[in-house]
Image (cartoon, rainbow, N blue to C red):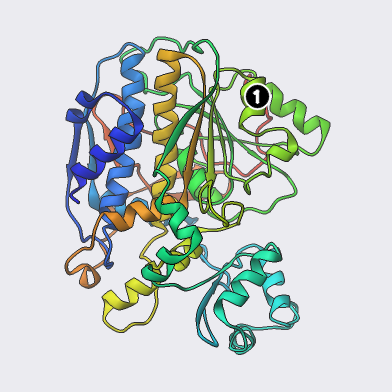
C-alpha cells in the first residue's frame, strides 16, 4: 500500500471530510530503515493523519485549511524516539530486557521497570540482587515459551512467547484483534457542544483545547506531545509513586507536568478540577485500572459531559488478552514481527523492528482520534470514546504489505532533523516534528520538565 492510500484509509476511518485529503503532501518512499515492513509508510501516514485532523478541526473553528507536508525519512527518524540530554544518549533498554532462548523457542521479557525485572528474575528462580544476564539465559532454557508467558501474565509481569504470523493468527487473541477496527470512535453520552473559541489565522489549530494526559509509556506520551505541537494545552498527570522511563524527557516537550495520586481525596479533587475545563482525557493505564478509581470513560463523561475520552491498550478491548499488560516490543514478538524480520534478513535470527513503530504510530493515532472526535463533538455534541491498541496498529502495519529490498536499506542520517532546546533535565536534543503546517508551524512552546514540575491547575 502506498502512503497516500494508507493516509486515505486512516482518514476514512476517522470519518473526516474527504476534501481535506487534498491538502496533504507526502514525499519519500520505503524502505527508509532496514525492515521487511513498511515502517516508513506507517510513520508518515499516521503523523500526516494526526496533523491533518488537527488542521481540519481548526478549519471547523473558522480558519482556512492549510497544507500539511510530511517527508517519510523525517517521519521515520522521528519515530525512532532518539534523544539526548547534555549530549548523553540514555540506554533504551535494561540489561535483562530482550529475547531469550527457551526449551522450545524464544521468549521476550520487558524489564525496564524494576518491579517487572525483579519479578521476572524471581519467576526464573533467581535472586534479583545477585543475578546477571547469563544466569537468566541459563534459567530460561528450562522453560517452554508459552508456559513462561502464561506464568508471567498470571504474576502481573510482562513477557511473551515468540510466534510466527501463522501461530498468532490461530490464537484466540489473534482472531479477536483481526476482528476489531484499527481505531474506534464511539458516542458514549449526550451533551451539548463544548464550544471552542474561534481561531485567528496565526493560531495553531488546537489552541484553546485542554488535554488531560494520564500516560507513561511511549504511545500515550507521543500522542500528547503531538497534540501539544498543534497548539493544545496538555497537562501530563503522573502518580508520584509510579516509575517513569527516561524518554519522558523527550515526550514531555510542550506539556505541563503535574503530580496527582488518584488513590487520595486530594488527588481526586485535583483531577476533578482539571476535568471541569478539559476537552480531552487520554489514558494508557492497565485496562480497568482507572475504572476502579472512578475515572473510567462513563465516569468521566458523567463528570464532564462532552469530553473526548481516549483509551490506549496493548491488545485491544476483546479477547482473552484484553486485560493483559503489554509494551511495543512484546506485542511485536507475540504477533509474529520478530520472527518475520529474521526470515526477511535471511538468517532466521529473530529481531525487533528497527523502531518501536507500534508505539509511535499508535501515539499519532491517539492524536488523530482525539481531533476527529472533537470535530464530531463540535458538530453533533455528545461525549465520545476513542479506543486504540498496539496490537491493532500491528495488524494495520502488517496489512501495509512487505517492502522489497527492505532489510538491505541503510539507516538515514538523523542530524539534519535534530533541534536543541532547554529542558528541566539539561539541554535536550530531539527531532523537530516532521509534519510541516504551511501557515501555523507545529512547535513546542513549553520546555520539557520533570514530572510534578507544575501544579495540577489550568490557571497557573
* Front-most of residues 56 and 202: 56
> Residue at coordinates 51% horizontally, 49% vertically from top-left?
316
| Residue 372, quarter of the rendered image | top left
Q: Is mark 1 on a helix, strand or loop?
A: helix
Left or right? Give the position of 104 relative to 361. right
Q: Can residue 451 be seen in this view?
A: yes
| Residue 157, quarter of the rendered image | bottom right
> Residue at coordinates 50% horizontally, 60% vertically from top-left?
172
Measured as percent of width and height from the top left, residue 13 is found at 33, 35
306 relative to 220, above or below: above
* Front-most of residues 216 and 141: 141
59 relative to 107, above or below: above
> Residue at coordinates 36% horizontally, 19% vertically from top-left?
203
Q: Is residue 88 visible?
A: no
Residue on which disc 1 sits: 274
Left or right? Give the position of 208 relative to 264. left
> Residue at coordinates 48% horizontally, 61% vertically from top-left?
331
* Front-most of residues 199 and 286: 286
* Front-most of residues 319 and 162: 319
258 relative to 405, above or below: above
Left or right? Give the position of 320 relative to 411. right
Amino acid at each position: 500500500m502506498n502512503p497516500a492510500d494508507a493516509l486515505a484509509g486512516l482518514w476514512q476511518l476517522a470519518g473526516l471530510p474527504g476534501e481535506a485529503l487534498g491538502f496533504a503532501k507526502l514525499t519519500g518512499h520505503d524502505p527508509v530503515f532496514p525492515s521487511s515492513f513498511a515502517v516508513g509508510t506507517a510513520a508518515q501516514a499516521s503523523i500526516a493523519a494526526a496533523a491533518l485532523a488537527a488542521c481540519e478541526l481548526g478549519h471547523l473553528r473558522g480558519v482556512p485549511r492549510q497544507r500539511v507536508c510530511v517527508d517519510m525519512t523525517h517521519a521515520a527518524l522521528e519515530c525512532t524516539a532518539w534523544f539526548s540530554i547534555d549530549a548523553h544518549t540514555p540506554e533504551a533498554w535494561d540489561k535483562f530486557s530482550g529475547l531469550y532462548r527457551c526449551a522450545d523457542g524464544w521468549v521476550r521479557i520487558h524489564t525496564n521497570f524494576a518491579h517487572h525485572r525483579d519479578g521476572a528474575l524471581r519467576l526464573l528462580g533467581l535472586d534479583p540482587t545477585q543475578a546477571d544476564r547469563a544466569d537468566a539465559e541459563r534459567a530460561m532454557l528450562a522453560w517452554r515459551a508459552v508456559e513462561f508467558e502464561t506464568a508471567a501474565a498470571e504474576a502481573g509481569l510482562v513477557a511473551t512467547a515468540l510466534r510466527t504470523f501463522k501461530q498468532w493468527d490461530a490464537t484466540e487473541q489473534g482472531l479477536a484483534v483481526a476482528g476489531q477496527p484499527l481505531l474506534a470512535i464511539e458516542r458514549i453520552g449526550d451533551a451539548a457542544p463544548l464550544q471552542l473559541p474561534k481561531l485567528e489565522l496565526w493560531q495553531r489549530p488546537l489552541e484553546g483545547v485542554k488535554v488531560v494526559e494520564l500516560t507513561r509509556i511511549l504511545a500515550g506520551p507521543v500522542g500528547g506531545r503531538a497534540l501539544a505541537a498543534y497548539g493544545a494545552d496538555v497537562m501530563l498527570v503522573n502518580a508520584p509513586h509510579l516509575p517513569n522511563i527516561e524518554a519522558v524527557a523527550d515526550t514531555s516537550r510542550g506539556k505541563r507536568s503535574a503530580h496527582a495520586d488518584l488513590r487520595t481525596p486530594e488527588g481526586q479533587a485535583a483531577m476533578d478540577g482539571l476535568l471541569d475545563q478539559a476537552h480531552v482525557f487520554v489514558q494508557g493505564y492497565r485496562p480497568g485500572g482507572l475504572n476502579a478509581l472512578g475515572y473510567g470513560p462513563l465516569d468521566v463523561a458523567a463528570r464532564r459531559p462532552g469530553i473526548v475520552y481516549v483509551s490506549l491498550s496493548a491488545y485491544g478491548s476483546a479477547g482473552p488478552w484484553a486485560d493483559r499488560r503489554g509494551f511495543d516490543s512484546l506485542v511485536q514478538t507475540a504477533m509474529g514481527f520478530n520472527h518475520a524480520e529474521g526470515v526477511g534478513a535471511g538468517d532466521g535470527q529473530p529481531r525487533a523492528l528497527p523502531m518501536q513503530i507500534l508505539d509511535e504510530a499508535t501515539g499519532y493515532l491517539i492524536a488523530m482520534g482525539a481531533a476527529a472526535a472533537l470535530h464530531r463533538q463540535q458538530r453533533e455534541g455528545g461525549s465520545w470514546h476513542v479506543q486504540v491498541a498496539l496490537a491493532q496498529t500491528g495488524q494495520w502495519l502488517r496489512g501495509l504489505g512487505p517492502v522489497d529490498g527492505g532489510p538491505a536499506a541503510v539507516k538515514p542520517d538523523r542530524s539534519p532533523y535534530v533541534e536543541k532546546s532547554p529542558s528541566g533535565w539539561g539541554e535536550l536534543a530531539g527531532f523537530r516534528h516532521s509534519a510541516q503546517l504551511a501557515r501555523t508551524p507545529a512547535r513546542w512552546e513549553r520546555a520539557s520538565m520533570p514530572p510534578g514540575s507544575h501544579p495540577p491547575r489550568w490557571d497557573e
